[in-house]
Amino acid sequence: MNCSKVGTFLPLLVYGDLTDDEAAEVQKHLLECAGCSAKRAALVQVRRALNDMPQSEVVVDTAAIAQRAVPRSPPTRVWRKLAAATALAIAIGGLALLKLDVQVDGRQLTVRWGRLAKPQATGDVAALDERIRVLQELTHALAADVSARDRSRDVDRLSARVDALSRHVNRRFSEAERDMNALYAARFKPEAKGDRQ
Amino acid sequence: MGNTGMPAAGDWRDDERAFTALVRRWQKPVARFLARVVIDDDRVQDLCQDVFLRVYMARQRYREGDTFSTWLFQIALNIARDEIRKKRRGGGPLQVSAAANAAALDADLEQKEIATTISHAVARLPPAQREVLALRHDQGMNFEQMARVLGTPASTLKSRFAVALNRLREQLAPLAKSLEET
C-alpha cells in the first residue's frame, strides 16, 4: 500500500471505519512511513478539535409547536360534512347557472347547456306565403313530371300494341295472298295448259 | 430507548408529553447537526424549532419500526439545505460560529487558536462534506445509516468523509507547526 492510498484510508482508520484487513495494512505502512504517521497524528488532533468545538444551548418550545400545529390539524367530521354540503350546493348552483339539460332518448344520452334555442317566429307573413307558393309550384311541377312519365308509359304500351297489330295484319295479308294464288292457280292453270297443247 | 431511538413510554404521535420527551432527547443532536452544516449559530434555535415543528406535523406519516434518527435527520437535512439555499440567494457569506469565537475568548491561547482555525476550516468545506462530517463525527452514524439519510452510496460517503478530514488536517497543519515551534 502506497502513501497516496494510505492517505485516503487514514481518516477512516482514525474513526475506526476500516475492515480488519485494511486497518492491518495501513498500520503496517505506518510503522515504516514517518510522513503518514504524522498525518495520522494530525488527524487525531483534528478529531479532538472537532470534539472540543463548543455548542450553543438550544431549547425547543414544544408548546409553540402544538399551538402552531392546531390550525393545520385535520378537519373534524362536522367541518367535513359542512364542507361537503357547501361543495354540493356550489356544484348544483353551477349546474343551474349553466342551464344544464340532460335527455335520455332510447340508448342516447344528450347533454345540453346554455340557453335553450327557442323556435323562431317567422313574423313576416308575406315571406311565409311566398315560401308556400314556391312549394306549391314545386309540387305541381313534380306532379306534371310524374304525369308525363305515366303518359310516356301509355304511349309505349300503345306502340307495342300497334306493332303487334301490324304483325297480325301482315300475317293475315300473307295468308290472303297465298289463298288468292291458290284460287288463281285452280281456276286458270288447266286452261293455260290446254291452250299450249 | 429502543433501537429506533424512540422513548420507551407512550406513543409520541398521540401523546403530547411523550412528544416533549422526544424533543428533549433529540434537540441537542439536531442543533449540533444544524450548526455544523449551516454555520450560523444565530439561526440554529429557529431552525431547530422548525425541524421539530415539521416532525410534529408529519408524525402520522412516520412508520412504526423505521429508524427514527434516520427520519429525523432527513428532516433536519432538508431544513439545513433550504437555509443554505436561502443564504446563497441572499449572497451573504456563511458566518463562522459565534459560539466558537466566544468560547475561544475564555480558553488559553493554544485552544483559542485551534477552535478558531477549525471553525473557519469547517466553514470553508462544501456543504456536502459538512453533512458527512456532521453525521459521522457528531452523530456517530455509520456509513450505511448515513447512506439512508443522505440517499448517497456508502462508498461515495466514505471518500467524501476522507477528503473533508484531510482538508481540515491541511488547514490545521500551519497552526500545529507554529505551536510546535513556540
Image: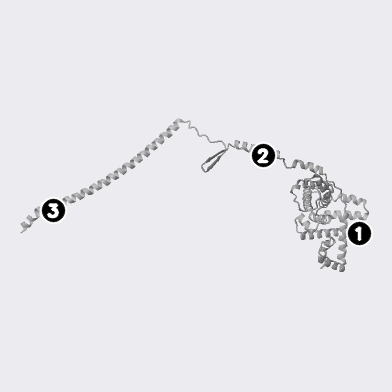
* Image spot of residue A96 (x, y percent): 60, 36
* Residues indicated by labels 1 and 2 sit on the same polypeptide chain: no
Mark 3, secondary structure of its residue: helix
Secondary structure under tag 1 reads helix
The answer to whether residue A6 is left or right of residue B61 is right
Q: Which residue is mark 1?
A: B178
- Amino acid type, mark 1: Ser
Q: Report x, y in % for residue B44.
A: 83, 48
What's the distance in space between the residues labelled 1 and 2, CA to CA? 75 Å
Nearer the observer: mark 3 or 1; the answer is 3
The numbered mark at residue A84 is: 2
Q: Earlier in the sequence, mark 2 or mark 3?
A: 2
Image point 78% across, 42% down: which residue? A68
Mark 2 neighbour density, 10 Å: few (under 14) some (14–19) many (20 or more): few
In this rendering, the label closer to the viewer, 2 or 3 = 2
Query: What's the amino acid at mark 3?
Result: Ala
**Gap between marks 2 and 3 measured at Cα:** 119 Å
Residue B135: horizontal and vertical position, in percent? 81, 55
The part of the image, by quadrant, that contains residue A21 is bottom right
Give the residue number, with chain letter if any, for mark 3: A182
Circle nearer the viewer, 1 or 2: 2
| CA gap, disc 3 and disc 1 | 168 Å
Q: Do badges 3 and 1 share one subunit? A: no
Query: Is B27 in front, or is A140?
Result: B27
Residue A70 in sight from this viewpoint: yes
Residue A90 position in % (x across, y down): 64, 37
Would you place residue A149 above or below residue B69 in this image? above
Q: Disc 1: which chain?
A: B
Considering the image in quadrants, where does the C terminus of chain A appear?
bottom left
Apparent side of residue B112 relative to residue A120 in the rendered image (left or right): right
